[in-house]
Image (spheres, rainbow, N blue to C red):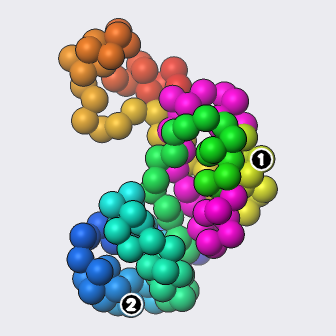
Amino acid sequence: MTRLERIAVALDTADRDTFERWAEFFGPRVGVLKVGLEAFVRFGPPAVEAARRTGARIFLDLKLHDIPNTVSGAVAAARELGADYLTVHAGGGPAMLEAAARAAGGQVQLLAVTLLTHLDAAELARLDLPGAPAARALAWA
């Protein structure tokens, strides 16, 4: 794998034209294009398919967190869409993570998000999750 193939570019924009321009420009030059939640909800699967046609691998950063059956269905849909990487939230628990892994079928690499970056110790305390963010992230990793 070349150094450029290790680079991921986030297509984080609310503008469809910008999304498509970035995908067309960066897709052939880097290894991975990341499609986040806002872009996915705004532009839907056709935008992911357009990014996929550039030849880059697709990273769907959706942080799925729901009951196991629902997450399983969403992972299967992402697999069918051609996602190479997909985020799930570790807070969904072991049953959800196991259902996601089964649905991925070895075709989608799942990345478990332990804590969102905005959660500091004060926010964790408000959620009745004591301790430092780093400790919580390690516990869920």
User: 103 or 118, which lies in front?
Assistant: 103
- The quadrant in which the C terminus is found is top right
Q: Read off the residue under disc 2.
A: 24
Which residue is the site of mark 1? 102
Q: Quadrant of the N terminus?
A: bottom right
Q: Residue at x 61, y 35 (%)?
A: 67
What is the x, y in percent for residue 44? 45, 71
Tag 2 near tag 1, CB within 8 Å: no
What amino acid is found at the position of numbered circle 2 in the picture?
Answer: Glu
Q: Is residue 58 magenta?
A: no
Q: Give the image location of residue 97, x and y in percent.
A: 65, 37
**Left-right relation of 107 to 134:** right
User: Is disc 2 placed on a helix, strand or loop?
Assistant: helix
In the image, the segment drawn in magenta is 76-98
Q: Residues within 10 Å of mark 1 (few under 14, many from 20)?
A: few
Q: Quadrant of residue 123?
A: top left
* Dot placed on the residue nearer the N-terminal end, 2 or 1: 2
Q: Which residue occupies the foreground of this view, 14 or 106?
A: 14
- Would you say residue 77 sits in the magenta stretch? yes
Asked whether residue 97 appears in the rendered view, the answer is yes
In whole angstroms, how far apart are the C-alphas of marks 2 and 1?
A: 32 Å
Secondary-structure class at tag 1: helix
